[in-house]
């Protein structure tokens, strides 16, 4: 069953689904980033203690475990969810002991030493550097106990929201916005997955209109395009009611949809040595322009340096994609030469023999 995340009120801390922090846009619509807070049936300082449980039944394991997840609840990490107290990472404090030179502390260390000396109240379990203005309603998922329960200034470990899920004491990554999840039917989940690729009101053809299919450099793989279209039409048949599939078959389409789309849009053919005419988007898509090809100014004006586009129709320099092959075309033709370094090339104008940039 697939889940759609929705905002969770700040005070709603009972066991619930949360976040999509462990998946990215390339993953497609799925429930791999949906977790539940399972009560551990204990409290610490009046706070409910939870285990973080995955959809497959595994738990986030104790910090330092060989694997991030465990099937044994006895080895699961115990956490609490608390509201944040924003701290300044640039905060500083000079600690002076007797006649010794001051020792300067910064960030969390500054807050700790000020609290030790001045008695300022400090709750490190709630501390974060992330501003509430950046993440309104942010919360912290922290270990139920500090690293040293006998030391009031000992730090806590947090679930960190970096690119890779982890546990640690990084105050730049320890705040979360929790979201509840709504269970969707297979058809609803498929519609949502399709809308992640094609916004409502548009068609797949409109989204892909600037992806040129072919075997040339800068063109996209025809086979991957065909695979995407076939899968999309299959999905479309389900949502439009012309194709009947089981929930399991629909979930299979959902799992394949975003990876298939990504496989196509990233399958651009690389540049290889050869002869090219370089045109831009405006010449192909806007009226009032010729084919807008790049040329060496020295081919038109004696002694000129630099590059220009052919630009507006009926101006001094014209290029059209159906122009016959002739000497007049040579100023638009660029020889692409391998530099010997992977992915890097020289561009030499066919008419002038000059290169773009420094001469090799």
Image (spheres, helix red, strand yellow):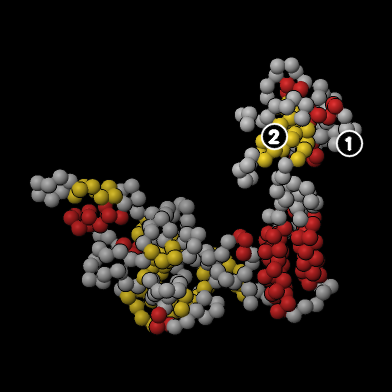
1 vs 2, front mark: 2
Given residues 300 and 9, the one toward you in this image is 300
State the SS at label 2. Answer: strand
- The residue at which mark 2 appears reads as 347
Image quarter hosting the N terminus: bottom right
Looking at this view, name the residue that lies furthest to the front.
Answer: 340
In the image, 107: left or right of 223? left
The reply, left or right, for residue 138 in relation to residue 195 is left
Residue drawn 31% across the image and 52% down it: 107
Q: Residue at 81% x, 22% y: name it.
A: 316
Residue 82 in sight here: no
Question: Do the CB atoms of the residues marked 1 and 2 lie less than 8 Å apart?
Answer: no
Q: Which residue is drawn at 81% across and 34% down?
A: 291
Q: Residue 13 in the image: x percent, y percent?
A: 45, 72
Disc count in the image? 2
Q: SS for tag 1?
A: loop
Q: Is residue 13 above or below residue 72?
A: above
Q: Residue furthest top?
A: 302
Find the distance from the CA under tag 1 to the CA under tag 2: 23 Å
Relative height, residue 292 to residue 257 (above, below): above
């Amino acid at each position: 069953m697939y889940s759609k995340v929705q905002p969770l009120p700040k005070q709603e801390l009972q066991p619930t689904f949360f976040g999509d922090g462990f998946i990215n846009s390339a993953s497609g619509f799925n429930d791999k980033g949906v977790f539940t807070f399972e009560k551990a049936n204990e409290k610490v300082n009046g706070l409910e203690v939870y285990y973080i449980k995955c959809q497959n039944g595994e738990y986030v394991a104790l910090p330092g475990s060989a694997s991030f997840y465990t099937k044994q609840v006895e080895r699961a990490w115990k956490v609490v969810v608390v509201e944040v107290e924003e701290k300044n990472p640039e905060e500083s404090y000079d600690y002076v002991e007797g006649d010794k030179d001051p020792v300067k502390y910064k960030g969390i260390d500054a807050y700790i030493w000020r609290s030790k000396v001045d008695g300022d109240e400090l709750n490190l379990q709630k501390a974060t550097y992330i501003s509430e203005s950046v993440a309104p309603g942010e919360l912290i998922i922290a270990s139920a106990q500090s690293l040293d329960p006998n030391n009031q200034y000992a730090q806590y470990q947090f679930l960190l929201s970096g690119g890779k899920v982890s546990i640690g004491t990084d105050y730049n990554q320890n705040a979360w916005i929790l979201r509840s999840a709504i269970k969707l039917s297979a058809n609803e989940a498929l519609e949502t997955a399709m809308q992640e690729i094609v916004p409502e009101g548009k068609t797949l053809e409109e989204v892909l209109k600037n992806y040129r299919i072919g075997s040339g450099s800068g063109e996209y793989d025809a086979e991957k395009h065909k695979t995407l279209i076939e899968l999309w039409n299959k999905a479309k048949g389900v949502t439009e009611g012309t194709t009947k599939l089981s929930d399991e078959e629909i979930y299979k389409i959902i799992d394949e949809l975003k990876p298939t789309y990504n496989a196509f849009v990233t399958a651009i053919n690389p540049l290889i040595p050869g002869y090219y005419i370089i045109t831009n988007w405006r010449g192909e898509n806007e009226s009032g322009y010729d084919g807008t090809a790049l040329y060496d100014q020295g081919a038109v004006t004696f002694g000129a340096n630099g590059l220009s586009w052919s630009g507006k129709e009926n101006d001094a320099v014209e290029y059209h994609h159906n122009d016959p092959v002739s000497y007049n075309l040579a100023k638009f033709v660029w020889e692409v030469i391998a530099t010997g370094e992977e992915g890097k090339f020289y561009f030499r104008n066919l008419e002038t023999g000059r290169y773009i940039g420094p001469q090799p």
